Structure formats: structure tokens, C-alpha cells
Image (cartoon, rainbow, N blue to C red):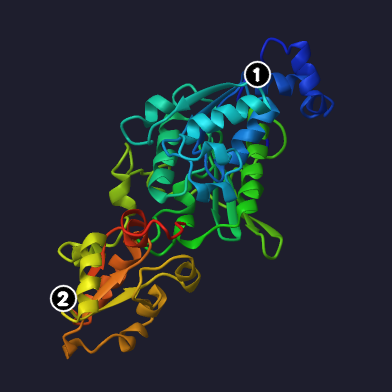
Amino acid sequence: MSFPPLVEPAAELTIDEVRRYSRHLIIPDVGMAGQKRLKNAKVLVIGAGGLGSPALLYLAAAGVGTLGIVEFDTVDESNLQRQVIHGVSDIDRPKAESAKESIAEVNPYVDVVVHGERLDNDNVFEIFKGYDLIVDGTDNFATRYLVNDAAYFLGIPYVWGSIYRFDGQASVFAPTLADDAPCYRCLYPEPPPPGMVPSCAEGGVLGVLCASIGSIQVNEAIKLLAGIGDPIVGKLMIYDALEMEYRKLKVRKDPNCALCGENPTVTELIDYEYFCGAVSEEAADAAADATISVTTLEHMLKEREEGTRDFVLVDVREPNEYEINKIPGSVLIPKGEFLNGNALSQLPPVDSGTQVVMHCKTGVRSAETLAIVKGAGYDDAVHVGGGVVAWVNQIDPSQPAY
């Protein structure tokens, strides 16, 4: 289904712009009118990370006149494997500023607006206001639902993308463009259970996958802005990089959708962190009085070496993570072993008097497994807040981070 262009054409292109965009101008479907629309367009990109990097670069190269960047994070060395808008010299710099400079190198005719803050309920409407289109490159569910709901309330279409390991997804959510167009909640009415879907920081992502999905997002953005082609409104693109396979599924508007359905229950912004939940209620309850710091763990390990303390330190990450860095003296029992029940036989007996101490990368997975262990009778079990990330940062910076 085609849609009218989102943007009116700019008055003109300069001679330099005609030279720059000549390969667009000779495409009949784009032409002078389409390029003028791109020049007049205002697009907001959420995140200057894995998806935001290629999206920003190609939107700039395409001649989108105004690009907004919402990004509060700084560049880390681990970002450079996929976030191609940043370089080595940008490490520890704000990502938004690094991205702005890279865009200027690609296309000095683009006006870049930096929103160097975390997107939340208090600022989302003010930030979104005035943009024609939103490109969502976020990597957490709370922000995705926030973007979806705010865009719907403001009547702004947006292009969504998601990546994990070798798999990517993309779609266009624009209920205001067509009565039968779904929103993100039509596709995913509820977020996955806490801890069920690892983040890219926990599960990893193939760097080039970001370019594959990011370029799809830009392709859809150009089609919407210029009013050409058949945007993937009401469709879900699924990409499997290992099998080199694309699939396109139909996504129908849900009449029972909490946001855009016939009887909506979400009529204003909600508490998205609570809605999505970083950890389950069981994990939060288990960790409430059973979380120790890495400095406490360091002291406990010294006592264990001296023979004055007895405990087992369990790392619940995956084997490939354990190869990157580890807390000395830990044993590896991945979280999946706790979920399927096999891990309990690898722990000391409940009545042995040996305490169980658990950790993961940041403390989320270990909180989930802590709930399982406590439920099995290990009442004095604890987990390490901050996990191995905190250990590397505070105790042993000689180890690599990831």
C-alpha cells in the first residue's frame, strides 16, 4: 500500500546539492521532487548505537535536511565492533557529539539537532514535537513501548528495528496513516518475561547485522518521506543472517490493542520500567536482602583462602562469556541449567553449611537464578550486585570488559 509523502518539497536545491544528489535525481521515482522532500524532512533517530549508526549516516547521505539524535551515552571501546559512526578517538566522548561530527563529514548540508539526554515520560513529547518521522534504534523494551505510545499520541509514524546475534526485525508503525495500520503493541501486546530475552550486551550481536537492519530502516524512511514505493506498514521483515533469508509476515491491527484498539486502556504515558520489569517480582524479592557488593565478595574470597569461610561462587553466564573474563575462584553453571533443574545437583547439599554466592555480568541473571536457589532451600544464598562488570571496574581492571 502506498501512502502520500510525509513532507512537502523544499523550495529548491542548490547547484552543489544537485551535484551531490545526482544519483537520486536520475531515479524517476525520486527525482527532483523527492529529493526536495528529503531536504525539507525532519527525522528523529533514537540512539546513536548499533542501528542508529548506519541509519544516521545513510539518512545524512540521502539528504535528509534535519536529523535529530536522542542519545545520552558515551562511546565505549566495545561499541566500535558495530557502531560505525564512532571511531577510536571518540572513546569516552558523548555519542551524540561524535555522531554529529561524523554526519558533518558525510554531508555538511544536514542540520543536526542533539538531544543529549535519556528519553523518558517527562521529555518525550517535547523532543518528538516538530519531527516528521522517527527511526527507533533502541535496545530495550521499556523505551520501545515509550516510543510507540508517544509517537501514536502525537500522530508521528515511526520505523522500528531490532537486532540480536544473527537475527533482525524491522517494521513501520503508522496507525495515523491508515485505519488498519497496526502499532508496536499490536505485534507485541506484552513485553517478554524479565530475563527471558537477553540484551545485546548479554547475548551479543553480529556487527554487520546492524548495517543490514539499519539500512532497511532508512529505506523505509525515504519511501515514507518521499511518498514512493510500498512501505512495510502492517508487515514484519525478519532477517536471518546465518541462513541469508528474509521473510515478510503480515501484521494485522489488533482490535483489542491497549493503545490503538477499539477500547483502548492506554490513554496516556505509563510507567514503562514497571510495565517491562528489569527482573521478575520473584527475583526482586529474592535479591532484596541478599545482594552483596564486589568489595564484600573480595573480602569473602580472602577469608575463603584463609580457611575461615566456606562458600561456592557460581557464575551463571554462558561459556563464551566466561572465556572473556571471570572472577577468580568461580565455577560456571549457566542460567539455563537452573531453569531446567540440572544445576541444583551441582551445588553443595542444602544441609552442608556451604553458602551459595551467585553472579553474572551485571546482576540481572544472577537475581533470577537466586530466586530459584532460594526456592530450593538455600536460604542464605546471595548474589553479587553489578556482577563481573563491577568486579572489573572496581577490583580488577586488568581484565577486559565486554
Q: Position of residue 227 (x, y in %)?
A: 68, 29
Q: Which image quarter: residue 9?
A: top right
Q: Which residue is mark 2?
A: 380
Q: Which residue is mark 1?
A: 109
Ranked by sequence position, the earlier of labels 1 and 2 is 1
Q: Note whether 275 is above or below 340 in the view shown.
A: above
Residue shown at 23%/60% (left/top)? 295
Viewer-proximal residue among 249 and 33: 33
Label 1: how many residues lie within 10 Å, few (<14), some (14-19) or many (20+)?
some
Q: Position of residue 398 (x, y in %)?
A: 42, 58
**In the rendered view of the protein, which quadrant contains the N terminus?**
top right
Q: Say whether residue 27 is left or right of residue 348.
A: right
Identify the mark at residue 175; answer none if there is no mark: none
Residue shown at 31%/85% (left/top)? 344
Could one spot residue 30 in this view of the protein? yes
Viewer-proximal residue among 121 and 307: 307
